[in-house]
Amino acid sequence: MGNSESIIRLKDVMKEFKILNRHEGLKGSLQDLFSRDYKIITAVNHVSLDIASGEIVGYLGPNGAGKSTTIKMMTGVLEPTSGEIFVNGKIPYKNREGNAQNIGVVFGQRSQLWWALPLVESFKILKDIYRISDKDYRDMLDLYDSLIDLGDLYSKPVRQMSLGQRTLSDILAAFLHNPAVVFLDEPTIGLDVSMKAKIRNLVSSLNQEKNTTVILTTHDMGDVDALCRRIVIIDKGTMLYDNDIENLRSFFGAYRTLKVNMNKGEITEEMKAEQLHTVEKLLSEQFSGIPFTYDTEDNWISILIDESRVPLMKVLNYLQENVKINDVRLEEISTESVIKKIYENNEKERKKQN
């Protein structure tokens, strides 16, 4: 494995897919049956990564970035086109059964629980599948009870559970056989604030208690801020960033967000668009050549400002002189804004190279 401390190691991993160039119409469909006209799509492009035992790593990227393909290679579902992958010292796609014994997986809305059975019956089946000893099984259930109030959830059929209860149960099922690595794909999607908090606390506690390595893919920056000390960002198959979350924020340390509200009551979408246009026009004329990033939420206009180029207070003072402002907020740059900025910079670099 090279690095004895790495529980997961990817070395120069690539994954390419051959996609048939399809033709239109019935004649085209017949052509496709015998066609050798393929294009090659690179889903993962020379990714190298070392993950130590006990880490929680946020694996982030927009849709189609290559996250799912990477995770499918780590879990042994896909074979890399080139490069090396080791999980627990084994090559996943060559040791699918052995790898499955040592990992837990929660993928989207695909449950590993038995729909019609009470939760505890699903757990008993998983106990047999993973050959968990009676003692280890009891110890794990005792740990669960100490971490979270499951109440009558054990006796509840999965089909009668809410989405939050089902996600919670799926996460408990993924940790049940005490795997070395657990992969969580969008674990809090569609959940309310209190259930999100419960799931984040559960994952954090299980990671600390069992030293389980967790690979988390999510679009919810609340998950990232609550759980991840390290972030890996991938876009169009290429790794853009691999470092801790504090470094990510300091990456754009000079940026702050100015939020202005120009209304006392609710306004129409047309009025919001008009106000945003006014602010953009004013700032582009006054601060020519300085880029600002704009966003709107409810009645607020957010302006991301690079203070190494222009002080935030200078921008605010200028706006107050030229438009009526009802309320103001100042915020440090969020993780989400930083990541968005990294994507934008990456896109600019790609366009320059092309």
Image: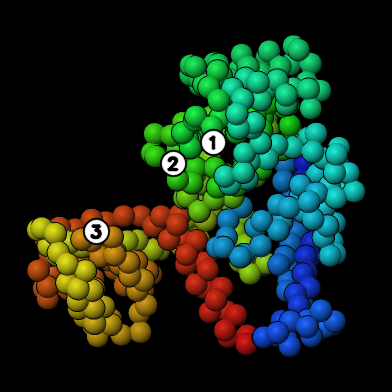
Distance (Cα) linking label 2 and label 1: 9 Å
**Which callout, 3 or 2, points at the residue further toward the start of the chain?**
2
Label 2 sits on residue: 191
| Among numbered discs 2 and 1, the one appearing first in the sequence | 1
Q: Which residue is mark 3?
A: 298
Q: Is residue 232 left or right of residue 302?
A: right
Q: Give the distance between the C-alpha atoms of the residues marked 3 and 2, in whole angstroms.
A: 21 Å
In percent of width and height, residue 145 lies at 55, 16
Q: Nearer the viewer, residue 135 or 36?
A: 36
State the quadrant of the C terminus: bottom right
277 relative to 341, above or below:
below
**Disc 2 packing (10 Å; few <14; some 14–19; many ≥20):** some
At 78% from the left and 83% from the top, the residue drawn is 30
Outermost residue toward the front? 26
- Whichever of labels 3 and 1 marks the residue nearer the N terminus, that label is 1
Q: Nearer the viewer, residue 130 or 314?
A: 130
Q: Which mark is residue 167?
A: 1
Spot occupied by residue 193 in the image (x, y as percentages of width and height): 38, 39
Local SS, label 3: loop
For the residues bearing labels 2 and 1, Cβ distance under 8 angstroms: yes
